Image (cartoon, helix red, strand yellow):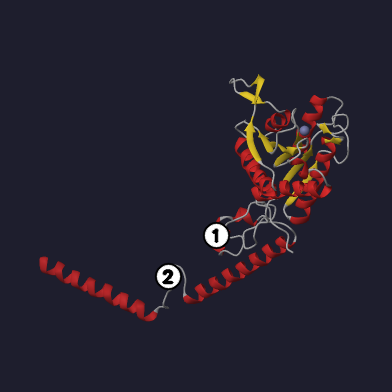
């Protein structure tokens, strides 16, 4: 019995080997152990390449139409696995997107301080509201002329108040920034002191946590440009309200522009360029050319902080 079992086992082993050899000799060689013959594989490759070409063509057409939606030239396996990205309405982009995603547009609101009956500081017939409007327009023009991915709005284009009371006038400036979905509001001002001996630039930033860091970063970039122009750097400051606190007891900002912008999650800063009543600082306001240089310094700081793309020459 034992001998018989041994013989059967040997015969079975030979049969298995014979079968295996026969199989290798006679069947088509396979590329994978299970799925495809060479012909099937070649056909699969053809289909895959055709799908890639079609996807690339579609992506190029959509890019030409301004649509950033679909997946690109990656293999059909990935396309199949993420078929939702084949939907042209899908606004998401994939790591394999062959077309660079356009740089997002930065929206800046520049606020020429004061206006109309709210004149701001005056000294020797020079009125702050006029200086701020000119400087703001120079800043806007410089940004629009030199950078691609930026939209700039002014809170006023002429000598006017934005409301019939000062409280609403100041809040309106932040509301305008909100309406434009602004990345930031930069309020342009000039300083003055009682004894006319103070000089240099102060920038007031919000102390509220949701916008504080961005305010400071933007302020530093603008301060750098203004000091390179020759104004003295004095301070980038937060100022607390004396009488307005949130539920946790934390003070709101003292200045309305900072406060109203922060309430709308917009970093709003006040740039007091220099002292218009000071002999030394007067060089920065005494001509339109000087105001242009100030406006452009603000613009360059904004562009630097938001990484705006320079237009090609
Ligand atoms: Zn002012």
- Report the number of discs: 2
Residue 212 visible at all: yes
In-front residue for pair 212/220: 220
Which of the numbered marks, if any, corresponds to residue 78? 1
**Mark 2 burial class by Cα count in 10 Å: few <14, some 14-19, many 20+:** few
Q: Secondary structure at mark 1?
A: helix
Give residue 207's position: percent from left, percent from top.
Answer: 62, 31
Q: Position of residue 145 (x, y in %)?
A: 78, 55
Q: Quadrant of the N terminus?
A: bottom left
Q: Is mark 2 in CB contact (under 8 Å) with mark 1?
A: no
User: Which quarter of the figure has residue 269?
Assistant: top right
Foreground residue among 117 and 34: 117
Query: In x, y percent, where is residue 195?
Result: 74, 29
- x, y percentage for residue 28? 42, 78
Side of 71 relative to 32 (left or right): right
In this view, the residue in front, 186 or 79, is: 186
From the Cβ of disc 2, is ligand 1 less than 8 Å away? no
| Residue ID at (52%, 75%) | 42
Q: Residue at x 64, y 47 (%)?
A: 305
Q: CA distance from mark 2 to mark 1?
A: 20 Å
- Ligand 1: which quarter? top right
**Quadrant of res 178:** top right
* Foreground label between 2 and 1: 1
Q: Could you tell me which residue is drawn at 16 percent across and 71 percent down?
A: 7
Q: Residue furthest top?
A: 243
Q: In the rendered image, which residue does mark 2 sit on?
A: 32
């Amino acid at each position: 019995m034992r001998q018989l079992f041994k013989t059967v086992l040997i015969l079975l082993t030979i049969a298995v080997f014979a079968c295996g050899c026969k199989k290798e000799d006679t069947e088509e060689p396979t590329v994978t152990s299970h799925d495809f013959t060479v012909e099937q594989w070649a056909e699969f490759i053809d289909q895959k390449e055709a799908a890639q070409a079609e996807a690339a063509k579609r992506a190029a057409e959509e890019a030409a139409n301004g649509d950033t939606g679909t997946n690109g030239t990656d293999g059909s396996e990935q396309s199949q696995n993420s078929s939702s990205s084949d939907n042209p309405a899908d606004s998401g982009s994939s790591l394999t997107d062959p077309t660079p995603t356009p740089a997002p547009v930065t929206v800046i609101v520049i606020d020429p301080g004061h206006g109309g009956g709210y004149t701001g500081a005056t000294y020797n017939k020079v009125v702050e509201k006029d200086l701020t409007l000119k400087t703001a327009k120079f800043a806007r023009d410089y940004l629009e002329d030199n950078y691609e991915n930026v939209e700039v709005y002014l809170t006023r284009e002429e000598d006017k108040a934005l409301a019939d009371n000062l409280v609403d006038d100041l809040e309106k400036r932040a509301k305008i920034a909100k309406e434009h979905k602004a990345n930031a509001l930069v309020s342009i001002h000039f300083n003055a002191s009682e004894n006319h001996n103070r000089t240099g630039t102060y920038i007031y930033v919000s102390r509220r946590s949701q916008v504080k860091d961005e305010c400071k970063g933007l302020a530093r970039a603008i301060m750098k440009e203004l000091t390179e122009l020759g104004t003295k750097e004095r301070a980038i400051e937060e100022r607390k309200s004396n009488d307005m606190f949130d539920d946790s007891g934390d003070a709101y900002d003292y200045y309305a522009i900072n406060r109203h912008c922060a309430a709308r999650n917009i970093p709003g800063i006040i740039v007091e360029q220099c002292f218009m009543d000071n002999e030394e600082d007067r060089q920065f306001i005494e001509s339109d050319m000087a105001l242009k240089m100030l406006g452009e310094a603000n613009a360059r700081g904004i562009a630097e902080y938001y990484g705006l793309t320079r237009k090609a020459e």
